[in-house]
Image (cartoon, rainbow, N blue to C red):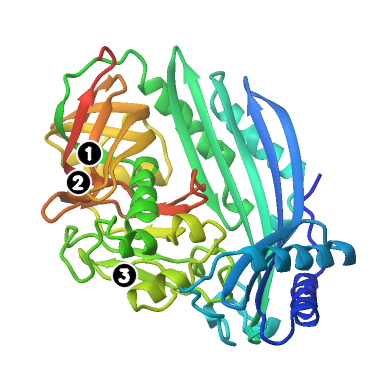
């Protein structure tokens, strides 16, 4: 079961066909936009240190949004033959006639070429810079994924392991009745696994645009070393602690910043902490949304959004100053801005948010320091110098089950996971049981609160919101731990 790749250009033909069907059925006054996306995912999952599931799924979805006589309606289908497309147009036309007036319709994206760094021009012409797509990853076999699982399990040296290795492929095309016509494709690989011993868990995660970048042996050894180091934890009282957050935990910060903070709809409704051109973060903090990837890290998303707007790099925070939030065409029109290329099916309800955020890494001190166990890899290298500078605090691997208590100030509550350690005078002295925290994320990264940033960002698998983040380790002056294992 390898990932299914359909013929290049097929999605663009489908999109153009639906636009023509709308024109014939509704006349030239109808405004139509069509997104055709083929998604294929293959997953090799393991538990109890053995593979128990290998699955693959592929589906092509056609989404139509139609504006006619001042009203708007949307429809979708996965039936892409002639009858399926004709039925989609007929249903959407019937729905638009029953829809309420849409006074905030922002109009269609005009013909606009894709940015060269995306590897494509408009109208489907390739620019020759398609460095963001790895054919081998798109066509990865179950045996290739299984070999990485095998290496992970062997590297754990007898510890119980569980997790997955996944490869995905997406190709998409967009066309509208205003003449915009673009296409693109992307592939990604990810591995996420835990090792467990005597109730203690260790985790290792990594994502890349190339399956070849994932080394199961390195990830398995890291997870096992962290699990062994987390045995026999002590309990600490609640309170404010200096912390070093490893990249897995930092990804949760970036996720919540993106969905609830840099969301253009939340910003327009004044439900976001974001204030453009305000010094809201420590000067060491720069956040960039990078949907197109780069030569050094070719793991891009599609080069355009669901409205056909080309995507490009967007600086959200530069040296502590909030510079931008993300918009689709509707949220942009409501605040007098322009779309940043962040429309999605979800953006029409939940608002547009960044999905490829990178916290820029920074040079770190070079003093040697021991992590909780002697393991190699980007997480350890990124965190070691930060730990070495900590007088007394906590090294935290991961956060989970985080929930928003107050969206405007982005106060979050959640739990630590997969390893917490007490650090004293730059050395790890004890494993610590998991704790609950209640913390304003913007406040934690506010001016004067960031004591250091790791020297390398780690690309991590997508989270619950469908987002993917590149995160370094982070040294913060204060984190509010509000409970421990006993209450």
Question: In which quadrant will I find the N terminus?
Answer: top right
**Front position among marks 1 and 2:** 1
Query: Badge 2: how crowded within 10 Å, few (<14), some, or many (20+)?
Result: some
Mark 1 or mark 2: whose residue is earlier in sequence: 1
Q: Position of residue 300 (x, y in %)?
A: 55, 64
Q: Position of residue 296 (x, y in %)?
A: 48, 66
Say what secondary structure mark 2 lies in.
helix
Q: Viewer-proximal residue, 186 or 106?
A: 106
Residue at mark 1: 439
Question: Are dots 1 and 2 in contact, CB under 8 Å?
Answer: yes
Residue at mark 3: 324
Q: Position of residue 214 (x, y in %)?
A: 57, 47
Q: Viewer-proximal residue, 205 or 337?
A: 337
Tell me the residue at 41%/69% (across/down).
331
Q: Which mark is residue 444?
A: 2
Mark 2 or mark 3: whose residue is earlier in sequence: 3
Tell me the residue at 44%/66% (across/down).
290
**Front position among marks 2 and 3:** 3
Q: Viewer-proximal residue, 119 or 37?
A: 37
Query: Badge 3: how crowded within 10 Å, few (<14), some, or many (20+)?
Result: many
């Amino acid at each position: 079961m390898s990932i299914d790749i359909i013929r290049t250009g097929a999605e663009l033909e489908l999109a153009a066909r639906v636009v023509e069907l709308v024109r014939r059925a509704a006349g030239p006054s109808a405004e139509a936009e069509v997104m055709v996306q083929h998604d294929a995912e293959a997953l090799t999952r393991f538990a109890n240190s053995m593979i128990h599931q290998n699955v693959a799924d592929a589906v092509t979805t056609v989404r139509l949004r139609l504006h006619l006589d001042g009203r708007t309606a949307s429809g979708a289908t996965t039936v892409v033959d002639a009858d399926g497309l004709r039925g989609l147009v007929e249903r959407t036309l019937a729905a638009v006639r029953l829809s309420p007036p849409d006074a905030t319709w922002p109009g269609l994206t005009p013909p606009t070429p894709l940015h060269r760094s995306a590897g494509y021009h408009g109208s489907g012409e390739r620019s020759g810079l398609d460095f963001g797509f790895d054919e081998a990853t798109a066509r990865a076999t179950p045996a290739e994924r299984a070999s990485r699982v095998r290496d992970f399990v062997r590297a754990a040296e007898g510890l119980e392991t569980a997790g997955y290795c996944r490869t995905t492929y997406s190709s998409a095309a967009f066309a509208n009745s205003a003449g915009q016509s673009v296409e693109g494709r992307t592939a990604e690989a990810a591995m996420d696994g835990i090792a467990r011993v005597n109730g203690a868990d260790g985790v290792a995660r990594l994502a890349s645009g190339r399956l070849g970048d994932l080394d199961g042996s390195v990830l398995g050894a890291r997870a096992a070393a962290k699990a062994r180091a987390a045995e026999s934890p002590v309990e600490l009282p609640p309170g404010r602690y200096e912390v070093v957050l490893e990249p897995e935990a930092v990804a949760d910060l970036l996720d919540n910043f993106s969905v609830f903070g840099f969301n253009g709809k939340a910003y327009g409704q004044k439900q976001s902490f974001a204030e453009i051109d305000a010094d809201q973060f420590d000067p060491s903090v720069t956040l960039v949304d990078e949907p197109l990837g780069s030569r050094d890290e070719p793991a891009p998303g599609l080069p355009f959004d669901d409205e056909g707007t080309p995507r490009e790099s967007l600086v959200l925070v530069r040296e502590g100053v909030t510079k931008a939030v993300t918009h689709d065409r509707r949220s942009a029109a409501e605040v007098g801005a322009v779309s940043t290329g962040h429309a999605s099916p979800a953006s029409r309800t939940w608002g547009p948010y960044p999905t490829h955020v990178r916290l820029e890494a920074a040079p770190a001190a070079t003093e040697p320091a021991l992590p909780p166990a002697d393991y190699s890899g980007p997480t350890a290298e990124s965190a070691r110098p930060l730990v070495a500078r900590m007088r007394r605090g906590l090294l935290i691997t991961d956060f989970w089950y985080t929930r928003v208590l107050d969206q405007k100030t982005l106060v979050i509550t959640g739990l630590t996971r997969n390893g917490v350690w007490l650090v004293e005078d730059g050395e790890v002295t004890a494993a610590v049981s998991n704790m609950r925290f209640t913390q304003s994320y913007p406040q934690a990264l506010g001016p004067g609160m960031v004591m250091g940033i790791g020297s390398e960002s780690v690309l991590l698998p997508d989270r619950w919101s469908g987002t993917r983040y590149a995160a370094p380790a982070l040294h913060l002056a204060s984190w509010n731990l509000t409970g421990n294992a006993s209450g």
